[in-house]
Amino acid sequence: MATATPPSPADSAIAVIQLDNPPVNALSHATRQRLVSELTRAEDDPAVRAIILIGSDEFFSAGADVREFNTPKMTADPLLDAVISRFERCEKPTIAAISGTCLGGGFELTLGCHFRVATASAKVGLPEVKIGLIPGAGGTQRLPRVAGLETAVNMIVSGEPVSAADLGGSGLFDRIVEADLAGAARAFAREVIAQGAPIRRIRDRAVNYPAHQAFFGFARNMVKAKAGPYPAPLACLDAIEAGVEAADFDTGKRREREIFLGLLQAVESRALRHVFFAERAAPKIADVPADTPIRPINSVAVIGAGTMGGGIAMNFLNAGLPVTLLEANQAALEKGIATIRRNYEGSARKGKLTQADLEKRMGLLTPSVSYDSIRSADLIIEAVFEEIGVKEAVFRQIDQVARPGSILATNTSTLDVNRIAAFTGRPADVLGMHFFSPANVMRLLEVVRAGKTAKDALATVMQLARKIRKLAIVSGVCDGFIGNRMLHKYSAQAWYLLEEGCLPAQVDGAMERFGFAMGPFRVGDLAGNDIGWAIRKRRYAEKADPPRPNIADRLCELGRFGQKTGAGWYDYRPGERTPYPNADVEQMIVRFSQEMGITRRRIDDTEIVERLVFALVNEGARILEEKIAQRSSDIDLVYLNGYGFPAWRGGPMFYADTVGLTTVVGAMHRYARGIHPEPWTPAPLLQRLAAAGSTFSSLDS
């Protein structure tokens, strides 16, 4: 909403319109209507001689209301463009008073005002490029006219907010103040009235930049090198350049709108918007109300000081929470503490952390070799070896010492969390917290909800994830949860491709050209091929039938575990991460094909990509149908943030929607006629959606 504040007797000539749409003053349809209504009232009041538009201390406005995206309200009259035009064409001086955060359409609204007063700490920006768009309400046209071409290009192409203090010399602000924004804006308005200052519309200014063609040529080369497959950064330059070269403002503005609408339908922009909304939906759990009581988490214990345990501990230290790090013996404990300190020292050398911050974080860490030390912890996370017997021993000891109400979490990546919970007398307090390695860097956290996990325990961990800056995705219990269960199908196709005619570099190259950060064999070498081997051996032991020969097992039997041994699917030289193809591995692959009676053939990139990605999609559909994942967008977030799926493709499930589920099913039927038909039975949900001409995304709405 927007409300008008009654003027004091001393300022009866000044109307104040206040944005009032908590929490971020989003420019919803109702807010846009109220802005026009209040502006009209001020225009019609003969006593009013100047108009101030102001937000809250924290937010002038964060821009468009994301709750209205893809709804009729987004395009309902008055559009934001019309609101901005009303403020710009007003015959009385309009003054934007800016504090806190002012982004996107909110910032564009201030550019439609005639004057701008801001606090030095205010942050302004046009972040639309981050969701695959350009500013669509005049930002690419007005900002260069008032702040200068170079400043505008940097802000618009990067999408990063900038403080008013750092823009002080740009001409963007008429006054920058340290405090009392409302008072300063009124004082400025009185000056404008007293001086009879002429109205200054940004649209009437020109961009004065000699040899702008050369500047745009340079900028285009720089942006192209960084933009990769994303079209929006270069489109930003196109819109800005159109404004510089246009005969008048309206011509440039029309070009901005054309570019905006073109991007709106581009698959890359749709993918980024999909991710934007997916992240906002992920914390919502259907049967856990938003007002579910939260358990206080003031201290954390981590059991296991290895690479994973140390990384997990760092997340909580970074958030200012004290951590007790428990190990079985002093030597392992000291090694883990030294690794944590070394990681922080590396950050300090890069200027990301001060020495004082380093010592503060290390001061929150309590090393221990006694389970008695974790008695008072509010959250206890087990991060020991991935073997059920080891987990059982640890959880039985935790159960004996943990205080009532403490949340007990396992960092398992594949094991049965229901079974682990049953090792305790308090299964309601047990859940999975599957961190991804390196745990202090990777953003993804799979929160595994066991059959008896209490709602308040789940809600507490989901909230805590935000505090430690993790993207938490809820998963049900199954072997591998969401990510690793799907990865098993993906990896199996990669191995089958080797059997049928590919070599590792060909498969990796195809997936990297598709957009993955690394192909499956480079990932295996980085993570350690022995980790997957251990999981497979556990699965073999659980099944009565002997396993089919596996080419990845053969590699591990040769001791080629990856980068840590200098040899995996590739060779690695000391101090390098560059993969070098190995002739012996390639010969082993060819021999394996012969042993399996398979005639090797030429396989193109299209088949490689389809088989790997559609294997993910099919298993994702089963996961959805089994309600292991709440929504298809959650699956996409897991793969975007934990497995290197290209963000501009939106995740495996969104990608399947874009190519068409009938296309996916058709390809699966085609591959079912090959050597390995078993994986290509379409999941029932996938079949139903394809037959109905529907999408996975339709299930999330």
Image: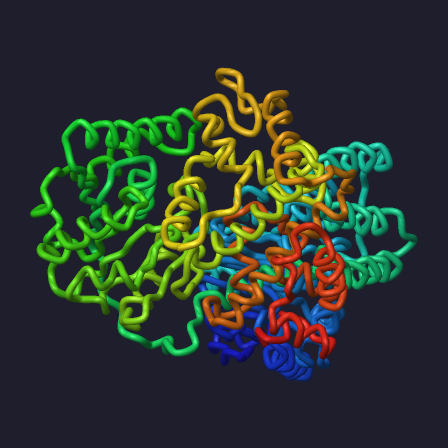
Q: Which residue is drawn at 22% across and 67% down?
A: 427
Q: Which residue lies furthest to the top in this view?
A: 574
**Residue 117: where, in percent of width, then height?**
56, 57
309 relative position to 476: left or right = left
Q: Which residue is drawn at 76% across and 41% down?
A: 603
Q: In front here: 583 or 374?
A: 583
Q: Which residue is drawn at 25% across and 49% down?
A: 382
357 relative position to 40: left or right = left
Q: Which residue lies furthest to the left in this view?
A: 372
Look at the image and tell me in which quarter the C terminus lies.
bottom right
The image quadrant that residue 689 belongs to is bottom right
* Count of marks, rendered view: 0
Look at the image and tell me in which quarter the N terminus lies.
bottom right
Q: In front here: 46 or 573?
A: 573
**Residue 62: where, in percent of width, then height?**
55, 63
Which color scheme does this rendered protein use?
rainbow
**Residue 248: where, in percent of width, then height?**
89, 56
Q: Can residue 629 be seen in this view?
A: yes
- Residue 290 to residue 411: above or below: below
Q: In front here: 623 or 596?
A: 596
**Residue 270: where, in percent of width, then height?**
69, 61
- Residue 103 to residue 519: above or below: below
Q: Which residue is drawn at 68% across and 59% down?
A: 655
Q: Can residue 264 be seen in this view?
A: no
Q: In front here: 698 or 568?
A: 568
